[in-house]
Image (cartoon, helix red, strand yellow):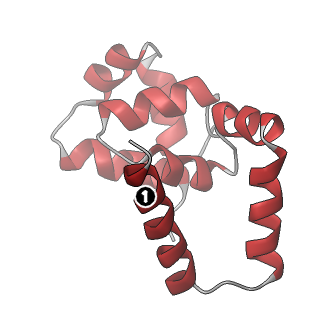
Amino acid sequence: MKNFGDTIRELRTAQDLGLRETAGKIGISPAYLSRIERGKEKPPKPEVIKALAKELAADPDVLFRLSSSTDPEVSDFLNDQPEVMELLRFIKDSDFTSKQIEKLLEAAKSIQTDSK
């Protein structure tokens, strides 16, 4: 798996976006973005990761995983909803497979649709 900086550079160049243009749109300096892409800086703060994800049309969860960070909104949600943490622990402790997790997600989406 690629590191955070390499992924950002690939996403940016795939969309034919310049370093200066991208940095300007997300409110950081081109030099800082360059250092991030070259692995000379740690991954940025969560708000910058979210802005990069939005600008580069990337999945923010993937970028957060690559940055070894957690979206603060997700952390807050987990803290506010102990049942969700209990569910996550159950999934982890039960060694759910990817297929089982996909089924669980489908079931959750179905429950949401049914309650509307």
Residue at figure coordinates x 50%, y 54% from the top left: 62
Asked if residue 62 is positioned above or below residue 81 in the image, the reply reads below
Of residues 29 and 49, the one drawn nearer to the viewer in this rendering: 49
Mark 1 is on which residue type? Lys
The residue at the far left in this view is: 16
- SS label for mark 1: helix
Residue at figure coordinates x 83%, y 79% from the top left: 93
**Residue 3: x and y, percent?**
54, 59
Residue that carries the numbered disc 1 in the rendered image: 109
Residue at figure coordinates x 52%, y 34% from the top left: 49
**Residue 24: x and y, percent?**
34, 14
Residue at figure coordinates x 48%, y 75% from the top left: 102
Of residues 46 and 91, the one drawn nearer to the viewer in this rendering: 91
User: For the residue carrying disc 1, how many other residues have a C-alpha within 10 Å: few (<14), some (14-19), or many (20+)?
Assistant: few
Asked if residue 13 is positioned above or below residue 79 in the image, the reply reads below
The residue at the far front in this view is: 115
**Residue 95: x and y, percent?**
74, 86
